[in-house]
Image: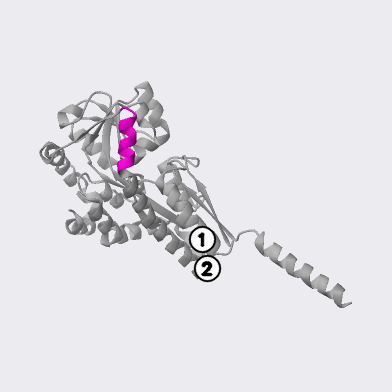
């Protein structure tokens, strides 16, 4: 009888353990991203977001990553987060201006001259204020990650002056400030989604595009573009956003775990991008692209053109943001 009881006890313990190990998660977080699975952003998310959350929640939360624009371009995945069909996404900052015009302050050309200045602003008063604006639209910012300084690529030749961009058809993101800046330097900006860009360059639908080195590599634009000019006209963020209602409905312990993991993944992503920046440039050079940097004197006409753009958007930003802008611009 004792042996039989012992057997039943063991079976009961095993059953409970098995049930715990294979219990369905209470929450699923889908994270959408347009970049590749090998991009530093995805590496940081796998190691410092997915793993800590699934282990820390003891299986109560399951995290699913969807890179390669599987769930749409930046605009589509941001809309998905707002609607709640996607719990989280990591779009570039530019498309978020479609939800609140004040967010496009991040896209002002030559707003930041160093990464440090950009991150201080994003992690401080500017980022906090932008988060409050998006929260009113149903989204929360959980981290400002690095996309990098944006540079121009084309097949015509090196870009050293605004005259070198005159009439050139350049793909931009769907952002009014980007459009205004490239018009100011004489180019013909053409908004286009990320998924269409490679083919458009290949077929000559557009002549040029602008992106950080990491995305030039990720999109394999070195296969269809010859020149890369380091204009560094915008420091571009990737923004880890979450559906506000989803976050608000999480139990306090799980909410804290997600917020903490998002912060750690964001900091690690910045480290990875910093470590690999030179490697990204080397890769495009080895692929045959010709790079040229701009001296401060060569860059000044671009900066002068950018100054004409700022007043165009003062009404969109409002007094509150313009005041913050004075504090963070450097």
Name the secondary structure under disc 2. Answer: loop
Q: Can residue 227 be seen from the camera position used here? A: yes
Q: Identify the residue at image location x=21%, y=38%.
A: 231
Residue 9 rendering spot, x and y as whole percentages: 79, 73
Name the secondary structure under disc 1. Answer: helix
Give the Cα separation between the discs numbered 2 and 1.
14 Å
Pick whichever, 161 or 251, lies toward us.
Answer: 161
Mark 2 burial class by Cα count in 10 Å: few <14, some 14-19, many 20+: few
Give the residues drawn in magenta, as a range.
278-288
Q: Does the magenta stretch include residue 300?
A: no
Of all residues, the one furthest to the top in this rendering is 203
The image shows residue 122, relative to residue 310, as above or below, that is below
In-image side of 16 versus 172 (left or right): right
In-image side of 121 versus 259 (left or right): left
Of all residues, the one furthest to the left in this rendering is 297
State how many labels appear.
Answer: 2
Q: Name the residue under label 2.
A: 251
Q: Mark 1 points at which residue?
A: 53
Residue 307 rendering spot, x and y as whole percentages: 14, 44
Of all residues, the one furthest to the bottom in this rendering is 2
Q: Which of pointers 2 and 1 indicates the residue nearer the eye?
A: 1
Q: Identify the residue at image location x=36%, y=46%.
A: 92
The image shows residue 217, relative to residue 46, as above or below, that is above
């Amino acid at each position: 009888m004792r042996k039989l009881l012992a057997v039943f006890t063991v079976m009961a313990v095993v059953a409970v353990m098995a049930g715990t190990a294979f219990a369905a998660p209470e929450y699923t977080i889908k994270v959408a991203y347009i970049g590749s699975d090998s991009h530093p952003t995805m590496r940081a998310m796998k190691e410092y977001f997915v793993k800590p959350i699934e282990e820390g929640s003891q299986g109560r939360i399951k995290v699913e990553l969807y890179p390669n624009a599987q769930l749409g371009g930046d605009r589509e995945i941001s809309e998905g987060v707002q609607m709640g069909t996607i719990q989280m996404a990591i779009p570039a900052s530019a498309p978020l201006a479609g939800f609140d015009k004040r967010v496009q302050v991040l896209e002002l050309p030559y707003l930041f001259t160093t990464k440090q200045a950009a991150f201080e602003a994003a992690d401080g008063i500017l980022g906090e204020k932008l988060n409050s604006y998006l929260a009113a639209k149903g989204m929360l910012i959980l981290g400002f990650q690095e996309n990098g300084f944006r540079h121009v690529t084309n097949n015509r030749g090196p870009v050293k002056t605004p005259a070198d961009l005159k009439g050139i058809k350049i793909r931009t993101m769907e952002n009014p400030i980007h459009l205004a800046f490239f018009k100011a330097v004489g180019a013909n900006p053409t908004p286009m989604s990320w998924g269409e860009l490679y083919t458009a360059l290949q077929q000559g639908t557009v002549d040029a595009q602008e992106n950080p080195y990491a995305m030039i590599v990720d999109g394999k634009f070195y296969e269809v573009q010859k020149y890369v000019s380091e204009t560094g006209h915008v420091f571009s963020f990737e923004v880890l956003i979450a559906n506000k209602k989803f976050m608000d409905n999480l139990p306090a312990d799980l909410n804290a775990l997600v917020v903490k993991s998002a912060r750690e993944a964001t900091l690690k992503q910045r480290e990875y991008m910093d470590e690999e920046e030179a490697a990204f440039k080397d890769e495009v050079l080895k692929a045959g692209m010709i790079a040229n940097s701009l001296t401060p004197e060569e860059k000044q006409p671009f900066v002068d053109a950018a100054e004409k753009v700022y007043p165009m958007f003062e009404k969109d930003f409002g007094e509150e943001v313009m005041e913050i802008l004075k504090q963070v611009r450097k």
